Amino acid sequence: MTQERPFIEDLHQHFPVQGEPPINTMNKKLVVSIASPGWLSTQQNPHIPTSHQAMAQALIDSVRQGASIVHMHARAEGGRPSEDPDETRKILDRVFEACPDVVTSIHINGDKAKSGVDMFRGWFEEITRGGIRYIQSTPLHTRGSVSSRQMMWDDPLLHGLIRYMEDSGVKPEILVYDTFGIVRAAEAIEKAAQWKPYWVNLNFGKHHSVPVGRDPWAHYEVMTLIKMTREMLPEGTVLGAYIGGRNWLPLTVLSIMMGIDVVRVGVEDCLWVYPHRDEIIQSDADMTRKIVTIARELGREIATPDDVRTILGLKKPTP
């Protein structure tokens, strides 16, 4: 016995694993956002929901699987995209009946005949009649137009909308699509944003953003942009990774391992379940469950809607 103890102590000194400090990269709750139904057609994915009930149910089922933010582009009954605020309300009212605490993330729609912030005032005032429940946060772009129907998101518009949204009690989500977008996001935070913590979301593999369709370069691209963004933005900025295209699953998992704060899943940006198989996504809830399961297996806790309000500094809106 007396000889065994020095032997054990020698082993402990040779490999002092018990003294290793924790690595806290993933030591924070993960926010999961569900984006559905988006703009894919039923010819691309026949499982895209096309009725108000089906759209709402897709969001409800995803929230029940662990999503705490719902991001939605409204469609009229039958599946035609719609910018009518009433369509948004009709769908989200069904969601609120089942999930009253969920956080909403809705794009603002504008009148192309007007300019600047004035483009959005009419639609925004209509959607916020009675409060901000339907649009608790809103994505704002750092890129220009991608089609003749869209306006240019220049600095005056971006900065003006950040101020307008913050003054209205709506949390701005600054969307970054490329390396120049990081510069624009940093400048927008410096010159316009005041509501801390700031919230910036990186987009990959969709909407003319950074392409991530080749391995292993896609992984390097994601790692580099996440690290670069963290270095260039103020400490404490909430950072999301919204990855579309075939490679969404492994790159979302990579982002989770890198300690990203927010991930987004769903049929808005993704068609295939896996990068190497032609299996079309049939259910947003299935994809939410998949990501939540992987995150938990990696030791990440999943944020509840109340957690999200703490993480983002949001107040709970009144119904």
Image (tube, rainbow, N blue to C red):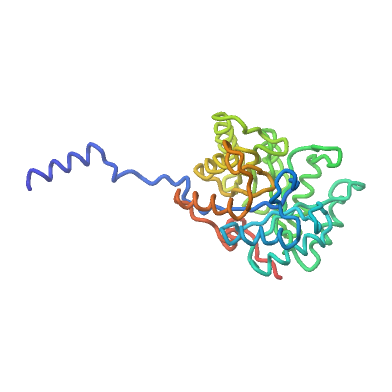
Which one is nearer the viewer's eye here, 55 or 208?
Answer: 55
At which x and y percent is residue 5?
A: 12, 45
Which one is nearer the viewer's eye here, 147 or 11?
Answer: 147
The residue positioned farthest toward the left in the image shown: 2
Q: Is residue 64 above or below residue 259?
A: below
Which one is nearer the viewer's eye here, 221 or 52?
Answer: 52
> How many callouts does the rendering have?
0
Left or right position of 15 against 259: left
Q: Quadrant of the C terminus?
A: bottom right
Left or right position of 47 against 150: left
Which residue: 22% across, 41% down? 12
Left or right position of 261 against 136: left
Which residue: 56% across, 59% down? 65
Which residue: 60% across, 35% down? 225
Left or right position of 51 against 149: left
User: Image quarter for residue 44?
Assistant: top right
At which x and y percent is residue 25?
A: 47, 45
Q: Is residue 11 above or below residue 94?
A: above
At which x and y percent is residue 292?
A: 53, 53
At which x and y percent is residue 221?
A: 59, 32
